[in-house]
Amino acid sequence: MADTKENIEKDVLFLYVSISGREKGMVDNYAIIENYLMIRMPEEIDHHRAVLISRTADDYIAHSKIVNIVFDFEDTKFMDSSGIGVIMGRYKKISCFGGKVFAINTSRRIRQLLAVSGMQKLITIME
Amino acid sequence: MEIRTRESKMCADVEEQEPVQDAMGAAGHEEMQKTIGVAKQGNIQESGGDAGNIGQQKAMGAAGIRHEYVNEMSLTFDAVSLNESFARVVVAAFITPLNPTVEELADVKTAVSEAVTNAIIHGYDSRGGKIRMYCMVTGNLLSVRIEDDGAGIADIEQAMMPLYTTRPELERSGMGFAFMEAFMDDLKVESRLGEGTKVSMMKRVGDAIRTA
């Protein structure tokens, strides 16, 4: 397979997914791998939780050399439009610097929410 | 009150639906109560022969709906974001006897979460207040009403357009009403500037509860 940018991105994501699968003792919900900010989303994402996630993510974006963001929905069982707001807000912040947003470990439900809100046009969604 | 009603998507059930829809207004609620009273009477007196049948017939005549089971609750809670989860759990517990599917449960929880969040952020500008939640189950039809006495909506049509938000600085996606509409069968919004907002939603869920 050619070393295209896309393939490298996929490799990094697969690497992350396999690591997080083994390291259950991961303390932080945020991790920086290369220039990717990984965010492990909580079990429930509503307005109450979204505020904190946005603030923390913005902190990382401002103080670290982050280009892309990956939202990990493995633990997520519920999300409302506040979650969409978090994704949209981060997308706006990094897309002007050429950054990309990914959603990984999405359930059918999460993919449905992303589709209803039109996010699938802006971000890369992986199962 | 400026009333905005979305047409019910359940076209096949329109006739059955209308009386319930009418009942969603404040005055209509009383009407509903009367109907509930008669229906309950009918159920209890069923073994009493004619008297029971008359009761049931009255129920059918009044609303054109055969009430299998009626359950109602109302709850008042603080308009703080911590209670968004609480409201979701309440409605989920309330409809559990209907045996909702996992998806129906998620749909209802999401819609309620959106309405409550709107009341907190937009109704009360995150400064606090009281939110009232009314839920009613008739047969397998869930009706939910979320009320606040907050700021009210200036232009309901505009507010309900997807991606429109009056608070872009809060990173609101503007998808709240769009989600409510997508996941519930019916959505009605009543609001008056400075007086508050009522969001009424309905959805058929699971199986009807039948009295033993």
Image (tube, coloured by chain):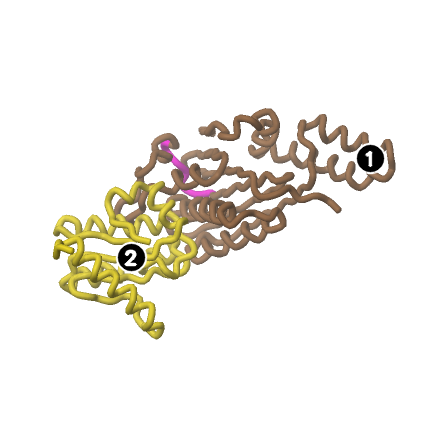
* A109 within the magenta span: no
- Left-right relation of B45 to A26: right
Three-letter code, disc 2: Phe
* Separation of residues labelled 2 and 1 (CA atoms): 59 Å
Which chain shows up in yellow?
A: A
Residue identifier under label 1? B52
Image label count: 2
Q: Position of residue B92 (x, y in %)?
A: 54, 51
Give left or right: position of A14 versus B208. left
Depth check: give the residue in front, A113 or A89.
A113
Residue B197, relative to residue B102: is it above or below? above
Which chain did the renderer colour brown?
B
Quadrant showing the C terminus of chain A: bottom left
Q: Which amino acid does label 1 sit on?
A: Gly
Q: What stretch is highlighted in magenta?
A: B149-155
Name which quarter of the figure residue A24 lies in: bottom left
